[in-house]
Amino acid sequence: MAEALPDSDFSDDDQTPLDVEFNTAANHLRKITNKLDNNQLLELYGLFKQGTDGKCNTPKPGWLDGRGRKKWEAWRALGDMPSEEAKQEYIDLLQKYDPDWSELSDSKVTGAKEAWVAVSSLRFSPEPELVHDQLTILEAAREDCGDRIAKLLSSNPELKHERDDDGLTALHWAADRDATEALKALIEYGCPIDAVDECGQTALHYAALCGHIKSTQILLNAGATLHEDEEGCTPLDVAADNEIRKILEGAT
């Protein structure tokens, strides 16, 4: 699933120099994902998870047609690697892939607790020169442009059925990015709440998987169901944490 990065869990004063550099590196990655192949992104993902969450302690996923499993395997392969070592390897690897990134180290660090989690399809192509009035409905969903979505759907309601090459609707993208304004606009204009991607997953699967509390609640309030994907997994089965699980369990 990239995205507006959430606030860091710690203030800059609480972070070590390694933490600051690691967060800057993770923030920069989202700008160059189109330059990296999936194997490179998977390696970085594993290091990111090891650096932020430590040893892999989650069950092997059985969804997203193997993509979730690949991400899990990249993390699990690191075994007991210390988080500080993983952070340094992450920095070194990004330096290898983009030697000029460190010149941006003085930029504001907005935090990277979930910098990778929202790239649920492993990669996407950022468009730094996006023009608001030229955004497609999928781009508007990714960029959380609710007003652009409203304009597009009011003039062409059929756009609510548009999909990308992976079968993702605008609702999937908005849920993946926690783009709540886009999500509300899409729902208001009648986008199918339980539309599924190529693996049978709904937008609620994406919101739950990414740990997006607001998006999860918005979808549930709009009538999203705990639909099973092609492997029999509901959003509750793939929920990122206990808080998301509690919300979903309240809907059963």
Image: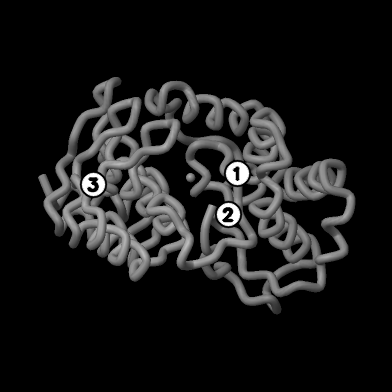
Q: Which dot marks residue 115?
A: 2
Q: CA distance from mark 2 to mark 3?
A: 32 Å
Q: Residue at x 52, y 44 (%)?
A: 119
Q: Nearer the viewer, residue 229 or 233?
A: 229
Name the quadrant containing residue 202: top left
Q: Residue at x 23, y 62 (%)?
A: 154
Q: Nearer the viewer, mark 3 or mark 1?
A: 3
The residue drawn where x is 61% and y is 55% is 127
Q: Amino acid type of disc 3? A: Glu
Label 1: how many Cα within 10 Å (few below 14, some 14–19, many 20+): many
Cα–Cα gap, marks 3 and 1: 39 Å
What's the amino acid at mark 1?
A: Lys
Query: Which type of secondary structure does the marked residue at label 2 adopt?
Result: loop
Which is closer to the viewer, label 2 or label 3? Answer: 3
Q: Residue at x 29, y 20 (%)?
A: 231
Give the total of numbered labels: 3
For the residues bearing labels 1 and 2, Cβ distance under 8 angstroms:
no
Is residue 61 among the parts visible in the rendering?
Answer: yes
Q: Circle 3 is placed at which residue position?
A: 158
Q: Label 3 neighbourhood size at 10 Å, few (<14), some (14-19), many (20+)?
A: few
Q: Tell which circle, 3 or 1, labels the residue nearer the N-terminal end.
A: 1
User: Which quadrant is the C terminus positioned in?
Assistant: top left
Amino acid at circle 2: Ala
Q: Element type at marker 3?
A: helix
**Quick one: 124 or 16, which is closer to the camera?**
124
Any part of residue 79 in sight = no
Q: Earlier in the sequence, mark 1 or mark 2?
A: 1
